[in-house]
Image (spheres, grey):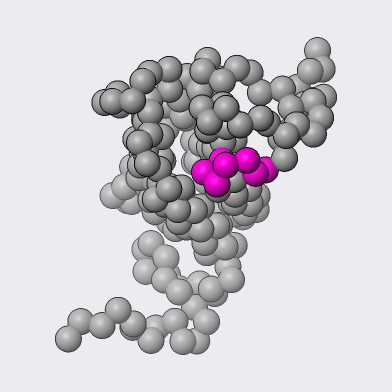
Amino acid sequence: MNRIYTRTGDKGTTGIHGGKRVPKDDIRIEANGSLDELNCQIGVVRSMLGCPVKPGMTEGGEKGTFDDILHEVQANLMVVMSQVATPSDIRDKNPNPLPDNLVAGCEATMDALTAESGPSCHFILPGGTPLAANLQMARAICRRAERRLWTLHREDPLPEAILQYINRLSDLLFLMARCELDRQDWPEERWQAFAYKNQK
């Protein structure tokens, strides 16, 4: 019988790509744990979607729905996690390469959402509809993952595209929450303007 448990982690270590074992609270595992939590939260968001609509289109669009966007994000996160689990000296042997358009694709999606809901100029109190609130939760988890990745990066350099993508992803999730509020005609609870973005 094939069992899911292996007992190999009972002494507080876990395996990473390449066969090495590290402590379960190693920064590499902390970083990937945050990415895993983010992926799970995005799964929660996807489970809440009824009839997602492509930005700027009516119901029935074939591509660009919230579900399409988040499905691609989840697939990208699995690749990112594989890369993060791999020490830099053997990363060229990882069979899961990062997509070429990882960052550019995320930015293009953000541009489409911004065109629909308008520019983001204010801090917004998380909440509103359940979907928007859960997108904001995903955004906060994404920010934590980014912090953990930078800590790891100082110990063992990560591909620049990963650090850029996770930074863009938190903004994407914020924009999706705004877009959800706009689509539901739910007012944003604004705190104050982005002073740092308004500086010339």
* 116 falls in the magenta region: no
Image mark count = 0
Name which quarter of the figure residue 117 lies in.
Answer: top right
Taking the spot 51% from the left edge, 27% from the top edge, the residue there is 183
Q: Is residue 17 something that shows in the picture?
A: yes
Taking the spot 74% from the left edge, 27% from the top edge, the residue there is 122
User: Where does residue 46 sit, x and y in percent of width and height?
Assistant: 40, 46
Which quadrant holds the N terminus?
bottom left
Extent of the magenta region: 126-132
Which quadrant holds the C terminus?
top right
Q: Is residue 19 above or below residue 97?
A: below
Q: Is residue 1 left or right of residue 148?
A: left
Name which quarter of the figure residue 85 lies in.
Answer: bottom left
Taking the spot 72% from the left edge, 40% from the top edge, the residue there is 125
Which residue, as the protein is rendered here, is positioned at the far top? 200
Query: Which of these two is toward me, 46 or 101?
Result: 46
User: Where does residue 167 sit, x and y in percent of width and height?
Assistant: 58, 37
User: Where does residue 149 sit, x and y in percent of width and height?
Assistant: 59, 50
Query: Which of these two is toward me, 176 or 162?
Result: 176
Q: Is residue 43 left or right of residue 127?
A: left
Q: Is residue 16 above or below residue 179?
A: below
Which residue, as the protein is rendered here, is positioned at the far front? 185
Q: Is residue 171 above or below residue 154?
A: above
